[in-house]
Amino acid sequence: MQDNDFKNVLNSRIAETERILKANLPEENKYSKTVRDAMEYSLTAGGKRLRPLFMQAAYELFSCGDNVTIGYELSAFMSAIEYIHTYSLVHDDLPAMDNDEYRRGRLTTWKVYGDGMGVLAGDALLNYAFEMTSKAALRAIENKDPDMAERCIRASMVLSDKAGIYGMIGGQCADICAEGKGSNVSKEELLFIHEHKTGCLIEAALMVGGILGGAGKEDVDKLEKIGSDIGMAFQIRDDILDVIGNTEELGKKVGSDEANQKTTYVTLNGLENSQKEVERVSYEALTLLDELPGDKAFLNSLTKMLIGRTK
């Protein structure tokens, strides 16, 4: 896919994703208005929307080809994974966690609504994500589509596993436990953190997209490995940007890893080796991607974009 074509498709898909994410938020309620506002504030702060984009692209590989109409089930899961990702950022910014005041160029949720409401906004986003996936399965049952109902249940199980204690939360736990340990953090420990804290949701995005599109187990397993490689590349690049990036472009303070005494891939392996590792695992992901059916042009370009990202 040519750069201009990719940018046009990417921008179009991001715009459609933004519309879906906002449309699927819960309706306003008099007594829970503040937390609903905090949810929307958190969600509409911007971001790359990588996870729903990966999910849609994986779905297309196994369904009817490129530019598939986004139906109810795919819409629900695209929203769910971004709500889960957003909740993790909201909680990550809290004073008890990273104590960050800015994200994506504006005040973090807890700085605007207070740390208590920040906790509730994250809780609400997480809970509502699985409310949506449950409704997707129920809707398929009501529409007498047992195949899609089963896919939704399997996809929801993958999403909950990758977001939970054996996935993202497990990675965040290891990340907190590693703070202040300095050089005592092992490479194995750091790779576990990267694989789980960042990689698991990207794995989930690709796996869920494949499952909803009708992929078999072998291809879903490949999607999981591709997501793991992409997640590793993404997180190492994030570590690199915390050293060489700038606050204005990133929309958040740089140097926070060093300030929090956090061991990163860069501190363990150096800047040059870290950049080489990003390229290595990205190449591995692209090689595996070639083994899957369908038109991989958009997924290829999206993955390559992550290698050289500056924000």
Image: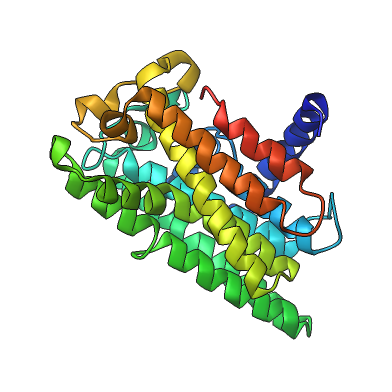
Q: Position of residue 16 (x, y in %)?
A: 74, 42
Residue 151 horizontal/vertical position (percent):
66, 75
Q: Which residue sits at x=45%, y=36%?
A: 277
In the rendered structure, the answer to whether residue 253 lies left or right of residue 9 reads left
In the image, residue 207 above or below residue 115: below
The answer to whether residue 27 of the structure is visible from this angle is no
Q: Considering depth in this image, is 283 or 206 the residue closer to the camera?
A: 283
Between 7 and 32, which is closer to the camera in this rendering?
7
219 w.r.t. 247: above or below:
below
Indicate left or right for 178 with 281 as reference: left
Residue 82 location (% of width, % of height): 55, 49
Q: Which image quadrant: the N terminus?
A: top right
Residue at point 39% right, 29% down? Answer: 273
State the image quarter where residue 101 is shown: top left
The residue positioned 85% from the left and 56% from the top of the image is 65
- Percent position of residue 250, x then y: 46, 22
Residue drawn at (70%, 36%) of the image: 301
Q: Is residue 285 visible?
A: yes
Query: What colour scheme was applied to this rendering of the protein?
Result: rainbow
Residue closer to the observer: 249 or 290: 290
Vertical arrangement, residue 214 with respect to residue 71, above or below: below
| Residue closer to the observer: 274 or 140 | 274
Q: Please indicate whether residue 86 sits to the left or right of residue 123 in the image.
A: right
Query: Number of marks in the image?
Result: 0
User: On the rendered structure, is 127 left or right of 60?
Assistant: left
